[in-house]
Amino acid sequence: MKNNNNNIEVGRFRVSPMSQAREGGGFDALVSIRSGNGMASVDRVMRFTPQFHSSKAALRYARAEGLAWARRH
C-alpha cells in the first residue's frame, strides 16, 4: 500500500489517499478519513471500484473522492 503522507485536513477530518497494487496488474484507490482524538477517534477506510493503470491515477481519484466525502459531512 502506498501513502505518500499526503494527509489533508478538511474541517474535523484528516483525509489520506492511498493506492494499492493488484495481483493481476493495475492499482486500487483507497482513502482513509479520520476524525476525533484518542479513544474517541474514528477511521473510515474506503476502497473504490475502478481499477487504474498507475498508482498516481489511483491516488488522484482517492484524493478527489475523500475530499468530496469530507466536505459533505
Image: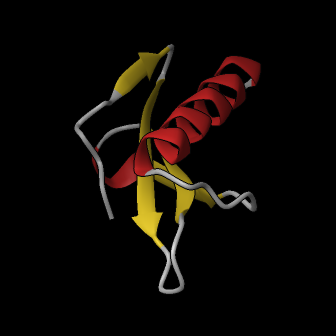
Residue drawn at x 69%, y 57% is: 48
Describe the colour scheme in one phrase. Answer: secondary structure
Return the x and y of residue 15 as percentages of the image width and height: 46, 33
Return the x and y of residue 17 as percentages of the image width and height: 45, 41
The answer to whether residue 41 shows anywhere in this view is no
Residue drawn at x 54%, y 67% is: 26
Front position in the image: 46 or 73? 46
Residue drawn at x 68%, y 17% is: 71
Task: Identify whether 21 is placed above or below 40.
Answer: below
Return the x and y of residue 72 as percentages of the image width and height: 76, 21
Front position in the image: 66 or 39? 66
Judged from this view, the residue extending furthest toward the left is 5
- Is 41 placed left or right of 7 in the picture? right
Residue drawn at x 30%, y 31% is: 6
| Quadrant position of the N terminus in the picture | bottom left
Front position in the image: 25 or 63? 25
Q: What number of labels is visible?
A: 0
Judged from this view, the residue extending furthest toward the bottom is 23
- Is 39 placed left or right of 36 in the picture? left
| Quadrant position of the C terminus in the picture | top right
- Is 32 placed left or right of 4 in the picture? right
The answer to whether residue 53 shows anywhere in this view is yes
Return the x and y of residue 53 as percentages of the image width and height: 56, 55
